[in-house]
């Protein structure tokens, strides 16, 4: 995060004596990224965060690849991924490369039996359906429909859901996910032309501090495997922390669209960046106001990046037959554009209610077996006129 946050009790000076009411020292932990050069947080634990009791086993969560190399546009019906009780079991990787996994999940139950930590990747969880609380060792954040939850790698978390009907679109990134650099000044502050600002970013405001010893199962993801580790102390035992590395939330509804007289290119929708892909938010907005403007996008060749669009809600101006929860994949190497009739249909329209999340990757994405189970195999022919 490009700003400083403090929660709970901390001593006035780093790396100095800080005692519990019983006179013992709190355990200080520096939680750094990019070695010691990236964002970091200094947290104070009731117990040592290092007390491993047992490593019970490990298992692979590597996706099964169906298509290594392809040039076919696809549509996937995301809501056809069947709900599962457990959060980790429900995570279904549909698209993948060495930088990023695109995941659909429909968990029904809150996480109560274990804690989860992804040491491989930052996670960006978009809440399509459902509400609840993200509980982390650095504090809790309530979430609801339309929220992005950004969970940096290494944050220990649980998701608590209010009910069983949950749909998540998760981007799991081996590269750190940041706010776009062009929207930040040299101090890290978001600038006036940014579509959102610090007020829109919701930080953890409540901290759970559990002084408990026992057996605590932590599932740690590392190199595409989950390690079942048993710790001797409750993972949420922080009394206070400060720094720049913490989870936060941003509602897609707080993203202020940038509009123009003629069609604006995708970068105006950019919400997050990495050096391997970008994430964009398409939100309800007024259309282009040049008298002859065509609001639908023109055909375009994203010749060297794959484009993934996740449709959330509203009308989708350039697409025929697209529903909430669908994903379109337009691969690098070929042009794509509006469906037949969509450009004409868009002329004279003054606004759109569309809501969608886009992930554009610079390396091609592989299609998994799970994705093919929910795929429309004829989508790549959907630009033909019906008479062809
Ligand atoms: Fe596109």
Image (spheres, rainbow, N blue to C red):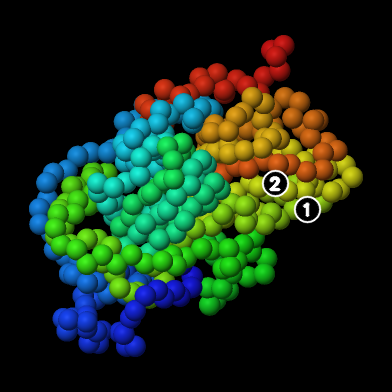
Q: Residue furthest right?
A: 291
Q: Mark 2 or 1, which is nearer the eye?
A: 2
Q: Is mark 1 within 8 Å of ligand 1?
A: no
The relative height of residue 119 versus residue 13 in the rendered view (above or below) is: above
Report whether 86 appears left or right of 23: right
Label located before the other in sequence (2 or 1):
1
Q: Residue furthest left?
A: 54
- Closest to the observer: 305 or 183? 183
State the residue at coordinates (18%, 54%): 216
Report whether 384 appears left or right of 204: right
State the residue at coordinates (36%, 40%): 109
The alpha-carbon separation of the residues under discs 2 and 1 comes to 14 Å
Say what secondary structure mark 2 lies in. Answer: loop
Which residue carries the number 1 mark? 260
Viewer can see residue 281 = yes
- Closest to the observer: 142 or 75? 142
Say what secondary structure mark 1 lies in. Answer: loop
Residue 387 is situated, as x and y percent measured from the top left of the image, at 72, 11
Which residue carries the number 2 mark? 284
Disc assigned to residue 223: none
Classed neighbour count for the residue bearing mark 2: other residues with Cα under 10 Å, few (<14), some (14–19), many (≥20): some
Classed neighbour count for the residue bearing mark 1: other residues with Cα under 10 Å, few (<14), some (14–19), many (≥20): few
- Closest to the observer: 42 or 297? 42
Report whether 19 appears left or right of 133: left
Number of numbered callouts drawn: 2
Viewer can see residue 366 = no
The relative height of residue 359 versus residue 9 in the rendered view (above or below) is: above
Quadrant of the frame with the C terminus? top right
């Amino acid at each position: 995060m490009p700003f400083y946050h403090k929660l709970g009790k901390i001593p006035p000076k780093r790396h100095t004596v800080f005692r519990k009411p019983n006179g013992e020292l709190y355990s200080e932990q520096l939680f750094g990224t990019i070695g010691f050069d990236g964002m970091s947080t200094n947290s104070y634990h009731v117990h040592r965060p290092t007390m491993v009791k047992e490593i019970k086993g490990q298992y692979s969560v590597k996706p099964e690849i169906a298509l290594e190399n392809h040039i076919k546009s696809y549509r996937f019906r995301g809501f056809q991924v069947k709900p599962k009780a457990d959060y980790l079991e429900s995570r279904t990787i549909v698209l993948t490369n060495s930088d990023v996994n695109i995941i659909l999940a429909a968990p029904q139950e809150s996480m109560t039996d274990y804690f989860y930590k992804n040491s491989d990747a930052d996670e960006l969880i978009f809440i399509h359906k459902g509400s609840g609380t993200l509980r982390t060792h650095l504090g809790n954040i309530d979430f609801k429909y339309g929220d992005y939850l950004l969970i940096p790698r290494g944050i220990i978390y649980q998701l608590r859901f209010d009910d069983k009907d949950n749909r998540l679109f998760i981007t799991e990134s081996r590269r750190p996910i940041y706010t776009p650099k062009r929207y930040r000044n040299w101090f890290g502050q978001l600038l006036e032309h940014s579509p959102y600002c610090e007020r829109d970013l919701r930080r953890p405001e409540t901290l759970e501090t559990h002084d408990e010893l026992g057996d605590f199962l932590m599932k740690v993801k590392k190199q595409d495997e989950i390690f079942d580790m048993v710790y001797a102390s409750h993972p949420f035992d922080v009394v206070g922390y400060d720094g720049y590395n913490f989870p936060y939330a941003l509602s897609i509804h707080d993203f202020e669209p940038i509009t123009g007289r003629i069609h604006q290119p995708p970068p105006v929708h950019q919400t997050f960046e990495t050096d391997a892909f970008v994430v964009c938010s398409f939100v309800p907005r007024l259309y282009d106001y040049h008298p002859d403007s065509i609001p639908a996008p023109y055909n375009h060749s994203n010749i060297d990046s794959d484009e993934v669009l996740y449709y959330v809600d509203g009308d989708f101006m350039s697409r025929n037959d697209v529903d909430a929860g669908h994903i379109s994949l337009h691969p690098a190497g070929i042009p794509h554009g509006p469906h037949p009739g969509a450009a004409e249909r868009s002329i004279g329209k003054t606004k759109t209610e569309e809501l969608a999340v886009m992930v554009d990757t610079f390396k091609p994405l592989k299609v998994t077996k799970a994705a093919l189970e929910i795929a429309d195999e004829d989508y790549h022919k959907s630009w033909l006129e019906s008479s062809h």
